[in-house]
Image (spheres, rainbow, N blue to C red):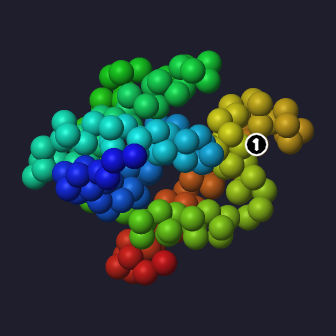
Amino acid sequence: MAEPDDHVLKVQQLFVRHHGQLSAFVMTLWPDFSRADDVMQEVFLTVTAKAREFSLGTSFLAWGRAIVRFKVIEMRRSAGLRSPSPEMLDSLTAACPDEWAGDDQLAALTKCLGQLAPKAREIVSLRYQREHSPPEIAALLSRSVNSINVALSKARAALRECMDHYRRAGGVA
């Protein structure tokens, strides 16, 4: 196996530097941690294979997000899942500034998730990691759909408050 050339290595280093931001972007498109890892592995392979197509000095994040977008669509399709509309994907891509969701913010979110009550954490996991709808969660937990919606709303508010506290503290989680 041939050694990667200097250009490929530089592009791979950019991938490593922006891994947290790309992972966070994957999670906005497909909020399932195990699938997100699979997507990121595929993205790395694609970044490496197409490294020569990337112009150093241009926005790696824009290029990386385009690859993420296509990989998510491809992997959702092969898993038999519906993908978000191209318009929604374009909107999410455009709404993500380069400094969005660095590794420290992901660490803070993980800490904030850990501070949720166990039942709230379970409901958030069922909804956003396992992609169950509120009616499915209600059936799984023998609760009403309304109680699940209220619990999700409260959990999102708690996470928002926790992340706001993290930002006000200057990034100290």
Residue at horizontal 52 percent and vertical 28 percent from the top: 75
Q: How many marks?
A: 1
Residue at horizontal 62 percent and vertical 46 percent from the top: 34
Q: Which is nearer the eye, 121 or 36?
A: 36
Tell me if residue 160 comes above or below residue 130 in the rendering: below
Position of 136 compared to 19: left or right? right
Tell me if residue 11 comes above or below residue 64 in the rendering: below
Position of 86 compared to 35: left or right? left
Residue at horizontal 36 percent and vertical 21 percent from the top: 86
Question: On the image, which quarter does residue 126 sit in?
Answer: top right
Residue at horizontal 25 percent and vertical 42 percent from the top: 51
The answer, for residue 16, to whether it is visible in the render is: yes
Q: Which is nearer the eye, 165 or 106?
A: 106
Position of 173 compared to 113: left or right? left
Residue most toward the front? 1
The answer, for residue 97, to whether it is visible in the render is: no
Position of residue 44 measured from the top left corner of the image (x, y, whole percent): 40, 45
Q: Amino acid at mark 1?
A: Ser
Few, some or many residues within 10 Å of mark 1 (<14, 14–19, 20+): few
Judging from the image, what secondary structure is the residue with disc 1 in? helix
Question: On the image, which quarter does residue 112 sit in?
Answer: bottom right
Position of residue 20 measured from the top left corner of the image (x, y, whole percent): 41, 58
Tell me if residue 28 comes above or below residue 97 in the rendering: above
Position of 134 compared to 3: left or right? right
- Mark 1 sits on what residue? 147
Residue most toward the right? 142
Q: Which is nearer the eye, 2 or 33?
A: 2
Position of residue 128 measured from the top left corner of the image (x, y, whole percent): 61, 43
Position of residue 63 measured from the top left corner of the image (x, y, whole percent): 24, 40
